[in-house]
């Protein structure tokens, strides 16, 4: 049987990625004693759990054929891979992360130019070195195995880290000097695998279902019964991805309406729908929305 070797990010993105796959219809399970080899209920996928920092390199070399990793690590590694899809989710939110230059609040470092001759700690060594070169600054960049925030100012002058909420930076009294890169999770493929018809079709199927699951994170279904005499008033209130589905009921004076809407607007429109004459209003969650 043909199989797709798929890289899954180990670490902070792991649970968010497994949850997204579950919503897309793929059930990944971790087996004890094989922490890098999860199982999945799709026999055509061979998953491998790898640090996101390394996934793009293994995809470029062909050890993996596709995988999910951050744009930040693709850029840092300079990996020559095919970007299939952009998925805006991270470990805690659906928002992008930012790779930032940060220094102690109140320090003399106010811009990248103030780093001349200074020391910077980061996991993003190549990205940081290119950033400094682009700005004409010479500084020492040292690799750090995470927890960069605790090193300022005793061990280093500044850091380059990724941040989702900024909470860790604020907790260590650090301020953002510059945003180097805004990053989202990407599904990427090895270029030879992408040229293979079966593998490309499989990767595209995975991308479509993941996109549908991610779309559904912010959408809900809404259905209701409406008297024809109130139809125009109710329709004037309803937002929709497309025109609502309208179905006749056994009573010819009534119809059923069904739409998909952003979850954040439901609390605002339900009271108005009720006052406009809608009855039996039901909100329900969605697993996938494929445009």
Image (cartoon, rainbow, N blue to C red):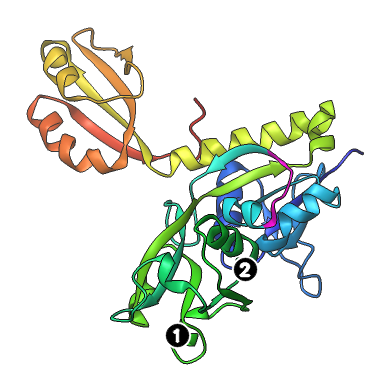
Q: Quadrant of the N terminus?
A: top right
The image quarter in which residue 207 lies? top right
x, y percentage for residue 248? 31, 11
Is residue 46 shown to the viewer in this render? no
Distance between mark 2 and mark 1 Cα atoms: 24 Å
x, y percentage for residue 54? 72, 61
Per the image, is 81 magenta? yes
**Residue in the image at 41% along x and 72% along y:** 114
Q: Is residue 277 above or below residue 74?
A: above
Q: Which residues are magenta?
A: 77-82
**Residue in the image at 23% along x and 33% along y:** 281
Q: Which residue is mark 1?
A: 152
Residue furthest bottom as drawn: 154
Q: Main SS of the magenta segment?
A: loop
Q: Do tag 2 and tag 1 residues touch (Cβ < 8 Å)?
A: no
Q: Is residue 102 above or below residue 72?
A: below
Disc 1, SS: loop
Q: Which residue is mark 2?
A: 11
Q: Earlier in the sequence, mark 2 or mark 1?
A: 2
Near-viewer residue (242 or 158): 158
**Residue in the image at 59% along x and 55% along y:** 17
């Amino acid at each position: 049987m043909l199989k797709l070797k798929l890289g899954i990010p180990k670490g902070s993105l792991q649970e968010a990625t497994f949850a997204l796959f579950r919503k897309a219809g793929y059930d990944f399970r971790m087996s004890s004693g094989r922490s890098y080899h999860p199982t999945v209920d799709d026999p055509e996928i061979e998953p491998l759990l790898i640090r996101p920092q390394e996934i793009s390199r293994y995809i470029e070399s062909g050890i993996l054929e596709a995988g999910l990793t951050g744009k930040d690590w693709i850029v840092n590694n300079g990996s020559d891979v095919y970007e299939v899809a952009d998925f805006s989710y991270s470990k805690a939110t659906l928002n992008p992360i930012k790779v930032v230059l940060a220094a102690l609040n109140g320090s003399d470092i106010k811009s990248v130019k103030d780093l001349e001759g200074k020391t910077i700690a980061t996991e993003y060594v190549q990205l940081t070195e290119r950033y400094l070169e682009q700005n004409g600054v010479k500084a020492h960049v040292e690799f750090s195995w995470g927890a960069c925030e605790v090193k300022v100012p005793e061990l280093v002058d500044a850091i380059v880290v990724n941040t989702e909420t900024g909470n860790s930076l604020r907790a260590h009294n650090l301020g953002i000097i510059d945003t180097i890169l805004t990053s989202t999770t990407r599904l990427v493929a090895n270029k030879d695998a992408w040229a293979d018809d079966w593998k490309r079709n499989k990767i595209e199927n995975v991308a479509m279902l993941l996109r549908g699951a991610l779309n559904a994170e912010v959408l809900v279904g809404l259905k209701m019964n409406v008297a024809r005499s109130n139809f125009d008033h109710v329709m004037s209130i309803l937002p929709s991805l497309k025109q609502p589905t309208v179905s006749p009921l056994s009573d010819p004076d009534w119809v059923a309406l069904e739409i998909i809407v952003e979850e954040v607007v439901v609390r605002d429109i339900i009271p108005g729908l009720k006052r406009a004459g809608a009855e039996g209003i039901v909100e329900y969650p969605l697993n996938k929305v494929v445009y």
